Image: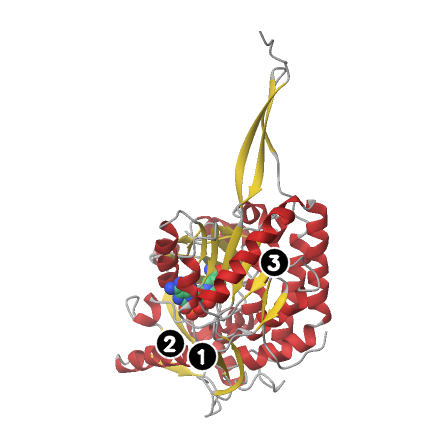
Amino acid sequence: MEFGSDYSMTIGGESVATSKTLPVVNPATGEPFANCPDAGAEELDRAVAAAQQAFAPWRQTPVAERKALLVKAGKAIEANADELAALFTREQGRPLALAKQEVLGAAIWFKVTAKLDIPVDITEDTPERRVEVHHDPLGVVCGIVPWNFPVLLASWKIAPALLTGNTLVLKPSPFTPLCTLKIGELLREVFPAGVLNVISGGDALGPMMTSHPGFSKITFTGSTATGKRVMESASKDLKRVTLELGGNDAAIVMPDVDVDAVAQQLFFGAFYNTAQVCVATKRLYIHEDIYDALRDRLHAIAQKDKVGDGADPANMFGPVQNEPQYRRVLKMIDEARALDLKLLEGGPVPERGYFIPLTLVDNPPEDARVVAEEAFGPVLPLLRFSDVDEVVAKANNTPYGLAGAVWSADVDKAVEIAKRLDTGTVWINQNLQSTPMTPLAGHKHSGLGVENGVAGLLEFTQPKAIFIPKVTPEVA
Ligand code: NAD
């Protein structure tokens, strides 16, 4: 495709512009560099109507054909990965190589999700009858995505919603709308008109969508506070909801690890994407026997790894994605400083743009904000522990339950600890892993429902039991 600098919405297979637009800022400079459409009620109605019209033929389209179109969508994204990655870096801030990884990850998600089958469950099969449970699509789905993984998380909504026979209206974050709009444009060539609609807008658009009566379901990824609002709004007409929300993940590092071997991976698991990852390590519990050695090693990495404009390949870490988040993280660091907590700062960062040095906090108290709350930015508390029961209790002492990690040379022992963590995912000696085949589920305030895997597909369906007699009843 011609990768021009116009950004339009995709409604009913057509390019749609709005009279009002919103500026999109490059977080590495703090300056706007493009505009995106600012949709209102009229465009939303139009998108919902297009998706409603497309629903009946799409649900009748054989599932094999729907899957083939998902694979085609994956290939279209892959073929445009370089252009999308460059745009991604400009709007989101992440260094180019890692931006491209996300774009290619989304392509993979389309292709691998296409391999999942919608099950038909047989709950009874006797000489008298057979009972089949089919999984029907719900109708028009509303997809809402945050700014930290705008492309990958869009694929987590599009692929399963469409595979299961639903149609979709997708909204990116106003901070990162451009790649999603471009993907909508690309996929106009792939899906029938109205099956995938992409609209963008400001703060008013999300609530307008969640209260729109034309949607049967909302699939939402974002903060816990917004997730609660989404659920409240959805309750008015019993829309189905899947909520993937915030986390305050703990990683537990046992004394038998090789400190030098694990330090870089641990660091990356906390600071990847400038620590704006729902499943990043946000509390790092280190056994007292290796605490000082690992802390010093992590601090050395923070000082060595370069932070700056993602367009420069020398930089490993980019800016915080947007100004409100930048101010929030700075405030958390200022509060830690005011409490006389010991901060270990990384290397220098550019003055222009939303840059913050990669910062470690040396063994703060459990009730410090930097421990108790999700920072969602480059500040990581290191916490000393001595006993497994104590550290499991601390790791679980949070309203969140998204993911966690255990690091140990003794994998069996690590698995035993993993079983005691109240989270939807636990990694052993690794982090930030997810696959299209594996359900991601937030426990407690980290979410409701599941994304990915067959369980994730089923969230876009409703079960329908069909009782089929094998003995023809005698009719009088
Ligand atoms: P956010 O909740 O502010 O915004 C998310 C999306 O919701 C955006 O598109 C926004 O425009 C929209 N929105 C805002 N208010 C709305 C409302 N009242 N009704 C409907 N939509 C509304 O979140 P964010 O700051 O963009 O993202 C960061 C958060 O997302 C973090 O807490 C992070 O942990 C979480 N997150 C979770 C996952 C996961 O899979 N669990 C993945 C990525 C991010």
Mark 3 or 2: the one toward you? 3
Which residue is at 27% across, 81% downward? 340
- Relative horizontal placement of residue 370, taking residue 284 as reference (left or right): left
Q: Secondary structure at mark 3?
A: loop
Give ligand 1's quarter of the image: bottom left
Corner quadrant of residue 464: top right
Along the polypeptide, which appears first: circle 2 or circle 1? Answer: 1
- Mark 2 surroundings within 10 Å by alpha-carbon count, few (fewer than 14), some (14 through 19), many (20 or more): many
Mark 2 or 1: the one toward you? 1
| Along the line of sight, the residue nearer the viewer: 414 or 357 | 357
Which residue is at 59% across, 76% downward? 7
Q: Which residue is mark 2?
A: 361
Query: Residue 196, percent across and down?
Result: 60, 59
| Along the line of sight, the residue nearer the viewer: 124 or 24 | 24
| Along the line of sight, the residue nearer the viewer: 260 or 373 | 373
- Mark 1 surroundings within 10 Å by alpha-carbon count, few (fewer than 14), some (14 through 19), many (20 or more): many
Q: Which residue is mark 1?
A: 322
| Vertical comparison of 307 with 67: above or below | below
Which residue is at 60% across, 9% downward? 474
Residue 136 visible somewhere in the drawing: yes
What number is the disc on residue 194?
3
Mark 3: which amino acid? Gly
| Vertical comparison of 277 with 30: above or below | above
Query: Residue 177, percent across and down?
Result: 53, 73
| Along the line of sight, the residue nearer the viewer: 432 or 94 | 94
